[in-house]
Image (cartoon, rainbow, N blue to C red):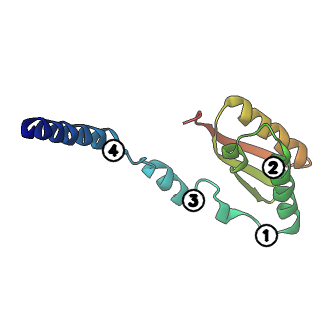
Amino acid sequence: MKRTLLALTCLSAFSLAALAADNKKVEPDNTATNERDRSGETKTSGDQSNSSADLKTTQAIRQALMKDGELSMTAKNIKVITVNGHVTLRGPVKTAQEKAKIDQLAKSAAGGAQIDNQLDVKGSN
């Protein structure tokens, strides 16, 4: 009986150790993205203009994204940055179709503003 109990205890310990090894998460390495954003070469949300026209453009695009029931939550959470009538779209989307749909919605809602589509297709992961 003691041998059986000892064997089960050892087996359980090995199983738990194997599960713990499988559950280790690999932290994402976004160092390159952070360096790019700090370089000043790309638009970030801090670059959003406070002019009335730019704020209205950003708001119109954001509302168009939220109204679209086909876009994923990832796509709805992209950055929309408007500066002097120039709109920059940044962030991940799940599919190329979402990227194209967002571009179309932004062009339609922006009333002729220039759109710089920098969206990245990241897939469903």
Residue at coordinates 17% horizontally, 42% vertically from top-left?
9
Q: Which residue is denoted by mark 2 in the rendering?
A: 66
Q: Position of residue 42 (x, y in %)?
A: 61, 53
| Lower position in the chain sequence, tag 2 or tag 4 | 4
Q: Upstream in the sequence, badge 1 or badge 4?
A: 4
Crowd class of label 4 (few under 14; some 14 to 19; many from 20; radius 10 Å): few
Residue shown at 12% from the left, 35% from the top: 4
Identify residue for label 1.
Answer: 50
Of residue 96 and residue 27, the one placed in the foreground of this image is: 27
Label ID, residue 40: 3
Whether pointer 3 and pointer 4 mark residues with C-beta atoms closer than 8 Å, the reply is no
Q: Is residue 44 left or right of residue 109?
A: left
- Quarter of the C terminus within the rendering: top right
Q: Earlier in the sequence, mark 1 or mark 2?
A: 1
Camera-near label (1 vs 4) is 4
Question: Mark 1 and 3 residues: CB-CB less than 8 Å, in contact?
Answer: no
Do callouts 2 and 4 mark residues in contact (Cβ within 8 Å)? no
Q: Earlier in the sequence, mark 3 or mark 4?
A: 4
Q: Secondary structure at mark 4?
A: loop
Can you tell which of label 1 and label 2 is closer to the viewer? 2
Residue type pointed to by label 3 = Gly
**Residue corresponding to mark 4:** 24
Q: Nearer the viewer, residue 96 or 12?
A: 12
Q: Residue 124 shows which numbered tag? A: none
Is 95 displayed left or right of 107 in the figure? left
Using the numbered discs, state the Cα–Cα distance from disc 1 to disc 4 in whole angstroms.
44 Å
| Disc 2 residue type (three-letter) | Met
Query: Marks 2 and 4, how far apart in space?
Result: 35 Å
- Identify the residue at image location x=18%, y=36%: 11
Residue 74: horizontal and vertical position, in percent?
66, 45
